[in-house]
Amino acid sequence: MEESVLCQWTVIRSIFAIVQWWCFNVAVIIMNKWIFQKLDFKFPLTVSCVHFICSAIGAYLAIKVLKLKQLIVVEPADRWRRIFPMSFVFCVNIVLGNVSLRYIPVSFMQTIKSFTPATTVILQWLVWRKNFDWRIWTSLIPIVGGILLTSVTELSFNMFGFCAALFGCLATSTKTILAESLLHGYKFDSINTVFYMAPFATMILALPALLFEGAGVVEWLYTFPSVVPSMFIIFGSGVLAFCLNFSIFYVIHSTTAVTFNVAGNLKVAVAVTCSWLIFRNPISAMNALGCGVTLVGCTFYGYVRHILSQQPQEIPPKNKSEFVPLVNEKVEDKDND
């Protein structure tokens, strides 16, 4: 009886964790798109900087004040040698996500972001000379095919937004790969990651945001009719961005790797549906098919990776193929935008 109750509670906790993760993720994406499209606040660097400031404050409160997580102590030298490079890539990742949201629909942007598994494998193969099992390469075929179909049939295609989203995938993959080496020895969770990286990211982004968007932001403040409510929305999106990182920590510890992968792909479908209901961006049948093929491919990739990770691992010779990518079993691109 006790085992049955415990099993039911585990299922309920997993469902709750997934739903709250979906809610925060979709809310951040929709609010960012709303800021760029409805509030006419077309300053992605400034929006990203606001998010980093809110995340830095939120992580400090969660760890130092509320004691919700124990602080992982990092040596001062490692903060610059290890954390700073990660923060730079983290910053580029978030900025490119926001830039793409300004120019292309959420549905298209989210589909392109699903290309990340392919860019991760390709980068490791080209740059780090890693070899993978043929099943990994096979699982990438529907992802690449779905992206191509979606791009060709996208009715609101914008080359600049497309490139920003695509390079955002490369930044996400680079961040994931670098984490394996730069953060070796530190068991970071999402909150500690934000605690150390958000201040660096704010420092990196503050000057470019001021130089390239400062004058435009000042003009917007003087000309936009509803500044105060709009500022609440902008800073509210920053608060939600931090909450998203916290929700990622909760869902990772409440679900299995396979469930996490499937839920992550369904999250994209939920975000695409919600954005279409709100912004009514045109989506053709072939475009929707391309998005679906991409999500099925991502799910298949996650399944293949999980199956291969369950096989007995032996230390291979230098030139022997490696079976799984050097990414964690449950990695979420904390690219919350």
Image (tube, grey):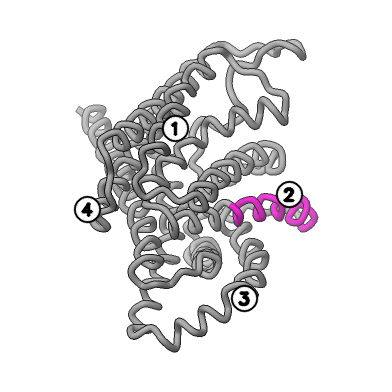
Q: Nearer the viewer, mark 2 or mark 4?
A: 4
The reply, left or right, for residue 77 in relation to residue 299 is right
- Say which of marks 2 and 3 sits in front: 3
Return the residue at label 2: 82
* Amino acid at the residue labelled 3: Leu
Kindly report the secondary structure that dominates the magenta region of the rendered protein. Answer: helix
Q: Which residue is mark 3?
A: 210
Residue 36: percent from the left, percent from the top?
Answer: 41, 66
Asked whether 90 or 116 is in front, the reply is 116
Who comes first in sequence, dot 2 or dot 4?
A: 2
Q: Is residue 292 left or right of residue 140?
A: left
Task: Tell me the tag on residue 277.
Answer: 4
> How far apart, in angstroms, are the residues tagged by discs 3 and 1?
36 Å
Q: Dot 2: what SS?
A: helix
Tag 1 secondary structure: helix
How far separated are the C-alphas under marks 4 and 3? 34 Å
Q: Which residues are magenta?
A: 76-92
Farthest residue to the right: give it. Answer: 77
